[in-house]
Image (cartoon, rainbow, N blue to C red):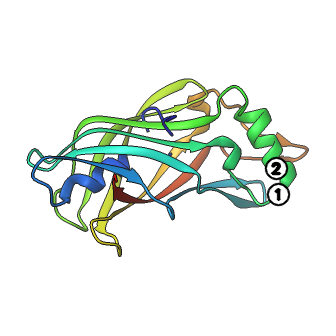
Amino acid sequence: MEPFLKTSPKLTVVLALFGWAAHAHAAEYEIAKGSRVQFLAKITGGSFVATCDQLKGKVSYDETASRIKAADVSARVNAIDTGLSLRNDHMRNKYLQEERYPAIHFHIENAPIPAAPGTKGTVEGTFTIKDKTQHKSIELTVERAKAPKHLSVHSVFPLNILDYGIPQPTMAIVSMEPVIEVTVDLILQPEP
């Protein structure tokens, strides 16, 4: 499995979801269908949203210690959709170089998480984009999902693309601001 954000969007958020799961020992979870990451980018005269629903990952949670033992989340670069084919091509190939760096990764190890459903908490992890890894603190909220034994995680945080060696996108007179808003919505299900 390729981690979504070797440190990180895709994620620390997943790890936090397991903080309140009802298991007396380390439990293993995986990212379920319905999970997605969105990136809001501001451009000259407006904005656009890029969405990725091709997320993979696993989370190991130790309920007795209220800790995520390990979490890895990855998002496929070639599955990120901005709504315009030319913009998708530029983003995937020119800026994210998807052939060389096919995924964005988030990783967490030995992180305390909120124990009560609906509680906001901050987790520490690492994001890796284009082989550049940065430490990141992320605030998230963990809730019970509709399906039994499933968890949902929600997080919104800023990310500066320049920190990952991605040049500021420009085309003619339009440019994109380097700080984007990332929204993560994950559904975690027990591993079979």
Q: Is residue 185 above or below residue 179?
A: below
Residue type, numbered disc 1: Leu
Q: Residue at x 29, y 71 (%)?
A: 148
User: Which residue was labeled with disc 1?
Assistant: 84
Q: Is residue 97 above or below residue 182?
A: above
Work out whether residue 170 or residue 62 is closer to the camera in this orientation and state it: 62
Q: Is residue 144 left or right of residue 40?
A: left
Q: Residue furthest front?
A: 192
Q: Is residue 53 left or right of residue 191?
A: right
Which secondary structure, mark 2?
A: helix
Work out whether residue 174 or residue 51 is closer to the camera in this orientation and state it: 51
Crowding at mark 2 (Cα within 10 Å: few <14, some 14-19, many 20+): few
Residues under numbered marks 2 and 1 in contact, where contact means CB atoms less than 8 Å apart: yes
Q: Residue at x 45, y 58 (%)?
A: 32
Q: Residue at x 30, y 62 (%)?
A: 142
- Residue 85 in the image: state x and y as whole percent: 85, 53
